[in-house]
Image (tube, grey):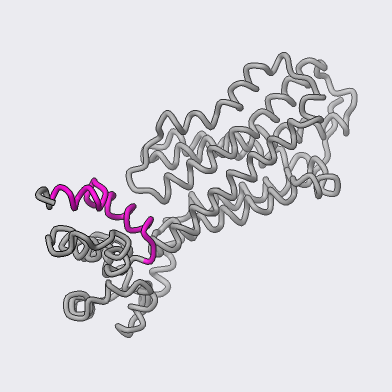
Amino acid sequence: MFRIDLITLFAAFGSFQGILFSMILWFRKKSKLSDRIFSLLLYATSIRIAKNIIVHAREIDPEMKMSAELWWSLVHIGLSHQFAIGPLFLLYFLSRTKNKFQITKIHFAHFIPFFVLLILTPLLEWPFWRYGGLWASYISILSYYLYSLWIYRKALGELPNLESLPWLKSLLIICGILLLAYSPALFKYVGYLGGSVLYAIGIYFVTIMVLGRDRFLSYFQDRYPGTSLDKEKTAQLIELIESKIHEEHIYLNADLSLSSLASELNTTANILSKVINSHYKKNFADFINSFRINKAKAILKDPSEVNLKIVAIAFDCGFNSLSTFNTVFKKLEGTAPNQYRKANNPAK
């Protein structure tokens, strides 16, 4: 008779819920590209965790009715999915921090190791994983995790008002804990099931966060009505914002932030963010950068400033790095600053 303990059952339900939740995200009507990517990430991770549960279940019940060939195939399939987790994690962060993000052929190249191993599943043997495969898969996930962390920190500096940043921070923390649990240094203490249990807890947390997010936000706004403004106060705040922008040119300050501007206007960052979003239909970073780019365009079109270096223009217009300036300029104007200058100064 098949035997299973309570902890293994809990971990199994976590893996099952991960797969179920991935299907819900994929097929729900309002799913965006980022939701579909996150759905695939949940699926790949759940399949990987299910492999540990299968291994542990056989340790509990050595007489489990499953052929050795099938058991090893499931193990190899589960381990192969480790090479899909990293690329999906990266794509998800890109989709949540980049406007109009689209998957390209280059992105598919990241999945070549996963597809190759999946095809070669019938030919794989345990020594492949034991003598290099496991280390390579862990390094792969860790590398993509660190790259995603860099993307998050970059977005934190350039787009401080991005709504998804708190959620991405939570996801980084959850995945960081799992990476630590599955690290080669700690795995022997955590065991096959320790990480699976942590994953189950993480899945329950993610489900609540994603499915209950809208309800939570509406509850928060109802409970704390002071975070909203009436029309009169909103109009007053807009007038102050316009004054700061057009008379004081605060956008030229590279250290300007949502919180610092809110402090100058004697309001909260939350209220200021809502007013800018609702009135200007932009987040704080896009709002400020639009004025910086307009200033830069005026300089780039000025024949008397044709010898001024692009990097100097970037700093003069309030950007704290040339790379950020180039990225924002191309995003808003569809061309690079130097190309814009050439197009507007043909004689030069």
| Residue depicted at x 64% and y 31% | 81
Q: Is residue 68 left or right of residue 311?
A: right
User: Eyeballing the image, is 269 above or below 341?
Assistant: below
Look at 71% across and 14% down and name the residue there.
122
Say if the magenta span includes residue 325. Answer: yes
Image quarter in which the N terminus is found: top right
Q: Is residue 49 rendered to the left or right of residue 239? A: right
What type of secondary structure mainly makes up the magenta span? helix
Q: Nearer the viewer, residue 48 or 306?
A: 306
**Image position of 168 (left or right of 290):** right
Q: Quadrant of residue 255?
A: bottom left
Residue 270 place in picture, x, y as percent: 37, 72
Residues 325 and 84: in front is 325
User: Percent x, y for residue 283?
Assistant: 31, 62
Q: Is residue 324 visible?
A: yes
Residue 296's quadrant in the figure?
A: bottom left
Identify the residue shown where x is 72% and y is 51%: 180
Q: Measured from the top left, where is residue 39 in percent x and y?
A: 51, 37
**Residue 251 among magenta residues:** no
Magenta stretch in the rendered image: 320-344
Seen in the picture, residue 310 relative to 93 is either above or below; the reply is below
Find residue 140 and report its horizontal and vertical position in percent: 64, 39
